[in-house]
Image (cartoon, rainbow, N blue to C red):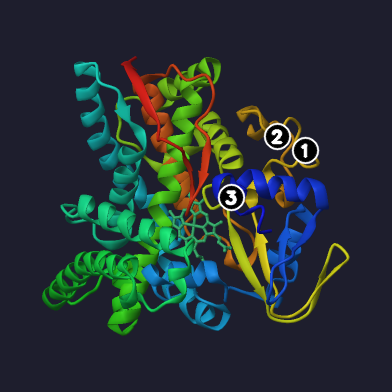
């Protein structure tokens, strides 16, 4: 393990893949303390997340580290806290609420297109990732926190990125074991989190003020949290959780999508043809979704190749057995959709970008083999929202632009909080 440290840091995904290939579906890492296992096979992953999910919780270093930013929100909450929280926020993700997100996606795409049209006119390349982060943040902000204003989207995007960056850097140094105030990185993190908290606190104050005037909190996430009478700390933790969970995931998926489209003319042309026939000049709308099966297949395939949430961890609450290996209570389990999605036992030609695999008339992949949103009781609550947003954005951009790049290979993946393209993605756009 010590010899592998450099490799783990430089090429985490490659390291995990080589472990799985050499040692099989469940690999025990020789590290001191409680057992640490890589669960790579589709079957044992399913057992941990779905069929024996109650035997596993989220009391892991990954989620504890994330909670330095998100607090005890829904994503990081361990079993009992999670059970109390999920019903409070679930109504914000009912079908009609998700459908209403389309209007916010439309607004975010209009702002993005206005920016990118200027870049096209000036012959400038566009830096895709920051633009997608901003667009996805605008959607989360409008759909869940307040549709009224979005003046603080840039501040939110920067403060969140900053806090996550420091958490990530901190997680890979011994300073992580010390209290926050003791190290410079810890103090920087506290400052970044305070910046995020200030924006969130303004949102809450504004909503309370409005509720005082109108007599109601509203049916979006923020309204539900306040109406449930949660203490301010819990409201803050949920709001930050949804900001973190809901924007970088969608933004990195869309960034990879454009990177892939720029190097695959036939797929880009087919996507554009579908979008031309469906979108017209009307605002983006949920009713368009069933008429965009190719855009959906492209998104599904991007989420297979680059599942943004590449690392899921669990702590065994009781003894269990996975693929014949005994897993004592207290063990740490490391799971990765990346491994399952690139496993040749599950997928033909797993590294190839082939949206056709997901077309409605293709043979559907086994649910066991495809889990970009996780699975079981802790499955992503924002799945439908993310799919709606992803499909509409892809279709709208493909209809408007041709994407170009000189790079022949995809950017190398960098496994951080999400899987990001190392060095970013810069593309030349041409109007269609
Ligand atoms: C492409 C976009 C997205 C991907 C790939 C994704 C992926 C995931 C995955 C894999 C999990 C399960 C984590 C685990 O089991 O440890 C998860 C949970 C979660 N996601 Fe997403 N997500 C996306 C978009 C969103 C959006 C848009 C939101 C909210 C607006 C969101 C909010 C959450 C929350 C709150 C949880 C925790 C759910 C629970 O434990 O009950 N996600 N997501």
Q: Residue at x 24, y 16 (%)?
A: 123
For disc 2, does the CB lie below 8 Å from ligand 1? Answer: no
Foreground residue among 87 and 118: 118
Lateral position of residue 374 relative to residue 390, left or right: right
* Dot in front, 3 or 1: 3
Q: Is residue 288 visible?
A: no
Tell me if mark 3 has few (under 14), some (14-19) or many (20+) residues whose alpha carbon lies within 10 angstroms of its own: few
Q: Residue at x 74, y 35 (%)?
A: 363
State if disc 3 and disc 2 touch (CB < 8 Å): no
Give the labeled residue for mark 3. 6
Q: Can you say which quadrant of the picture contains the C terminus?
A: top left
For disc 1, does the CB lie below 8 Å from ligand 1? Answer: no
Q: Image quadrant of residue 301?
A: top right
Give the labeled residue for mark 1. 344
Rounded to the nearest whole Å, what is the CA distance between mark 3 and mark 1? 27 Å
Residue 78 percent location from the top left of the image: 54, 77
Q: Earlier in the sequence, mark 3 or mark 1?
A: 3
Rounded to the nearest whole Å, what is the CA distance between mark 2 and mark 3? 26 Å
Foreground residue among 396 and 96: 396
């Amino acid at each position: 393990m010590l010899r592998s440290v450099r490799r783990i840091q430089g090429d985490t995904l490659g390291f995990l893949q080589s472990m799985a290939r050499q040692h099989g579906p469940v690999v025990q890492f020789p590290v001191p303390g409680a057992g640490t296992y890589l669960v790579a096979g589709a079957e044992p992953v399913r057992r941990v997340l779905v069929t024996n999910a109650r035997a596993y919780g989220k009391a892991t270093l990954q989620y504890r580290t994330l909670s330095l930013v998100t607090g005890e929100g829904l994503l990081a909450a361990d079993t009992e806290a999670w059970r109390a929280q999920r019903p409070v926020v679930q109504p914000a993700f009912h079908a009609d609420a998700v459908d209403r997100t389309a209007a916010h996606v439309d607004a975010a795409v209009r702002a993005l297109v206005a920016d990118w049209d200027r870049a096209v006119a000036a012959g400038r390349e566009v830096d895709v990732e920051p633009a997608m982060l901003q667009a996805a943040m605008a959607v989360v902000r409008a759909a869940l926190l307040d549709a009224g204003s979005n003046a603080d989207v840039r501040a939110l995007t920067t403060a969140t990125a900053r806090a996550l960056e420091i958490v990530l850097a901190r997680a890979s140094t011994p300073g992580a074991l010390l209290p926050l105030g003791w190290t410079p990185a810890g103090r920087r993190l506290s400052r970044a989190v305070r910046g995020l908290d200030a924006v969130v606190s303004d949102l809450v104050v504004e909503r309370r003020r409005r509720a005082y005037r109108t007599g109601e909190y509203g049916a979006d996430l923020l309204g539900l949290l306040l109406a449930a009478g949660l203490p301010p700390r819990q409201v803050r933790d949920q709001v930050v959780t949804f900001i973190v969970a809901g924007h970088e995931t969608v933004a990195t998926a869309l960034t990879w999508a454009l990177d892939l489209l720029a190097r695959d003319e036939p797929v880009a042309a087919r996507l554009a043809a579908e979008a031309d026939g469906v979108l017209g000049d009307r605002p983006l709308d949920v009713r368009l979704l069933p008429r965009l099966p190719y855009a959906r297949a492209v998104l599904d395939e991007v989420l297979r190749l680059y599942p943004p949430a590449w690392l899921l961890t669990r702590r065994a609450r009781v003894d269990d057995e996975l693929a014949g290996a005994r897993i004592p209570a207290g063990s740490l389990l490391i799971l990765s959709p990346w491994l399952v999605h690139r496993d040749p036992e599950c997928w033909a030609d797993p590294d190839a970008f082939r949206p056709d695999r997901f077309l409605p008339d293709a043979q559907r992949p086994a649910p066991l083999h495809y889990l970009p949103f996780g699975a079981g009781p802790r499955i992503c609550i924002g799945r439908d929202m993310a799919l709606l947003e992803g499909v509409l954005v892809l279709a709208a951009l493909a209809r408007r632009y041709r994407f170009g790049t000189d790079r022949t290979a995809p950017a190398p993946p960098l496994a951080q909080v999400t899987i990001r393209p190392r060095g970013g993605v810069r593309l030349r756009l041409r109007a269609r």
